[in-house]
Image (cartoon, grey):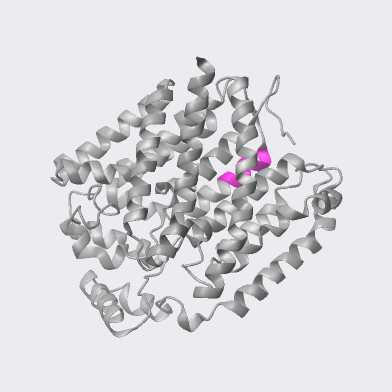
Amino acid sequence: MKFEVRFILQRLFFIGFWLATCTGFVSDLLFGPEMSGSPLRTISLILVDLILIFLAACTIRKKTDIFLIVSLLVIAAISGFIVNNDSIVVWLNGLRYFFPVLFMPPILRYFWSTEYRHDLFVKSLDKQLYIFLWLQVPAVLYQFFKYGAGDYVGGTMGGWFSGILSFSIYYTSFYLLNKRIDRNNILQSLYKNWTLIFLLFPTFLNETKISFALIVAYFILLLPIDRKYIIRMTFLSPLIVILVAVGSFFYYSTVDESQGKLKLDPEFFEEYLDADLDNIEAAAEYADKNYSEQFDMPRVAKLAILPMVFDAHPGHNLFGFGLSLYKHGSFIEASDFYNEYDWVMKGTSPQIMSSVLQLGIIGSIWYIVFFLCLFFIKIPLYPVRNYNMQAFFILAFLILLLYADFWSYPNFCFILLTFYFLSWKKGEGESQPSS
């Protein structure tokens, strides 16, 4: 009976994984990438949410996970019902934004709770992640030749997921290579596992500049950090330089900046950030109406005007503006606050911004506690840290604070949070770096 339960839960996990990471491409073929809210995508997202809820309900055991879920529900309830007067429908729909970070840890903890579950899960996971990497090659090539380098090149995840795709490819390839590499013979290991290096190629065909940081970290963190680190880096650095050069060549030869999103130039900061919100909004609306390219305010500008937004709306510092800012659509109306400041929230929102706007300072503290719990609560049967993998995970966390709120996307969390759990290994005694 235990095997049947484990089997069903594992199957559901991977069904959720493939729905989250492949429906977008199919939707784009049927409806076009411009229709990001297609019926197929909507149904898929709902199914993934239901799978996460069901799996979490079946697997949650640890008091820390229960505390984190209950505490977020309390914070969200105060923000939604007391501070912002949201309806129950709007509140429940907005709560979906937090499902991936709320429910993935207890689900993964279940598979790490016995060696039997863990070994079967990881064996299946490794095969499916390898298939996932290979699927990106034809998907990205098709999108690249059809739409050009840009936001539509999201691989099997579909249009508008180019950033998440790049993160997913680097972290998946790193995990699989990390398992196979002999750190005493780095170059020979890379040669033997050249396919995993080749499978980074799709990240050169979308315009995600963050790939340049990820590829450098990818190779640096393959090396064990010890007294021989500098020597190993000396031998590996030519390969890093070559790959970065190749990536730069593809990037600058395929991306037509004139067709990219409109970016506000430095004069924006000089002319408007010393002004008030009305002037900034007027500049944004003017750009949105008078340029053919999609208006996308720079992330730094978004963060810079946050204090102005809160000053204009006293009483929201602690608990934010509610859960309807990033989860609304055809059936759920956006809040008055979103309608007033949609010009700020269009495009990519840094994690700091989305957390503070929705749940205020208290909600931001919750996010900090969540990630601290991940790092400092060891998995009983797998207490040894793989420091290389965890350092790579920390890098993603730090980048996303100022880059994007990818933690709200199931396709991102299926890979990145699983990657983190895979960084815990079996061992005896004190934690030490593992290969």
Image location (x, y in percent) of residue 92: 23, 41
Q: Nearer the viewer, residue 434 or 279?
A: 434
Residue 253 lies left or right of residue 45; in this view the side is right
Magenta run includes residue 108: no
Q: Position of residue 57 (x, y in %)?
A: 37, 26
Which of these two is toward me, 350 or 325? Answer: 325
Rendered location of residue 412, percent (x, y) = 48, 48
**Which residue is found at the position 47% from the left and 67% from the top?**
152
Residue 211 point in image, percent of width and height? 59, 62
Residue sitting at x 52%, y 68%? 143
**How many numbered badges does the structure rendering display?**
0
| Quarter location, residue 367 | top left
Q: Can residue 389 be seen by looking at this rendering?
A: yes
Question: Which quarter shows the C terminus?
Answer: top right
Q: Residue at x 43, y 24 (%)?
A: 59
Q: Is residue 25 above or below residue 117?
A: below
Q: Main secondary structure of the magenta part?
A: helix
Residue 266, picture quadrant = bottom left
Residue range in magenta is: 387-393
Q: Is residue 245 left or right of residue 47?
A: right
**Magenta-drawn stretch contains 390:** yes
